[in-house]
Image: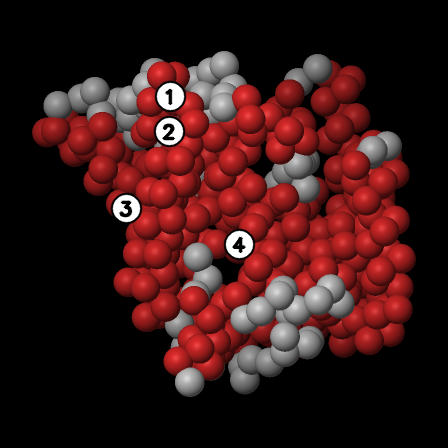
Amino acid sequence: MKRHNNFDLIRFLMSWIVVLNHAHILPHPPDPAIIAPLYWVTYVVQVFFVVSGYLVFSSYESSKSLSDYYTKRVRRIYPAYVLAIVFWALVGALLSTLPLAQYFLSPQLYTYLGFNLVFLNFISPTLPGVFSSNPWVEVNGALWTLKVEVMFYALVPAFVWLFRRFGLVRVLVFFYVLSVLYLLGVRELAATTGQLAYLRLQFQFPGQLTFFLAGGLLYYREAALRRWLLPGAMLAIPILAFPIPVVEAIIGPMALAFLTVWFATQFRYLGNFGRYGDFSFGVYTFHFPTLQWMISEGWFATNPIGALVGACALVMVSALFSWHVVEKPFLLRSSHYVKATREQAT
């Protein structure tokens, strides 16, 4: 992997596109209208999965041991994740329609904490009396991606063992095809049964595995595929902008991977973005409940642009706090971000 790349910038930009997208769709009716053109961006979350595939396989290959790899993964995401869950559970006591004592005695609060702290957000997505009158009642609906990420992290050692045992390309193609078949299968079930629940299943682990594996392939074979990154990136634009369902399911993940990795490694280096820290995770984990709170107060209904500006400011402050107080102190000294900060200081 090139020492100088734009991966940090990509993640930061993608996290803010997610914020703007949710700021548009969470109020009812969707607003501010100025954000509506961003609503077509359906691949933003998948960009995160591609980047993870590229970087997490790299992290595993550079780890001293299996425990070293898992320690790095846990330190990177879990402290900040716990902060986001616990912080909003406590703030929920002030926002709830229930009396304070009833809120803290409610089994729903502890069910929420229990399931969310182990990434099972979908089982208990709400807090007692919090955001219950909002169009969307989930406290932090953006966290669904993290359980998928964690499953990717957990399986990386198994994938690498399979690569070494049966060959990289053979294993990647096998699991890539299985993921595509799962995706097409749940879409067909949704079409034939009319059950929208099947459409939601396409966003779960098996359906998103293609993006992670595509990022992993480009990590392992970047030197061999480097001259194809720009043609692949150019071809990706029409494929992703004008998707044909079956074609998009089969080659869309690879197209997105080529576009993402080309921008990260071959496009002009846009500077050491990580020298200030990695705020993308804090932006991602704190933005949804922040927007929900401002919607519940009616600020998006009365002044959508002002509410959006205020929400973005609060989210950025939350991300800064999360990084400097929680995330960075838990990182190992060998972390890319610790090194980047040292480079900035010198």
- Dividing the picture into quadrants, the one containing residue 37 is top right
**Identity of the residue drawn at 56% across and 41% down:** 17
**Number of residue marks:** 4
Q: Earlier in the sequence, mark 4 or mark 3?
A: 4
Task: Tell me whether circle 4 and circle 3 mark residues in contact (CB < 8 Å).
Answer: no
**Of the two numbered discs 4 and 3 in the rendering, the one whose residue sits closer to the viewer:** 4
Q: Is residue 99 above or below residue 110?
A: above
| C-alpha separation, residue under disc 1 versus residue under disc 2 | 6 Å
In the rendered structure, which disc, 4 or 1, sits on the residue that comes first in sequence? 4
Q: Residue at x 89, y 57 (%)?
A: 231
Residue position for label 2: 307
Other-residue count near label 1 (Cα within 10 Å), few / some / many at <14 / 14–19 / ≥20:
few
Towards the viewer: 200 or 319: 319
**Contact, CB < 8 Å: mark 1 with mark 2?**
yes
The amino acid type found where label 2 is placed reads: Ala
Estimate the x, y position of residue 3 in percent, counting from the top left: 63, 78
Residue linked to disc 3:
86
The residue that disc 4 covers is 12
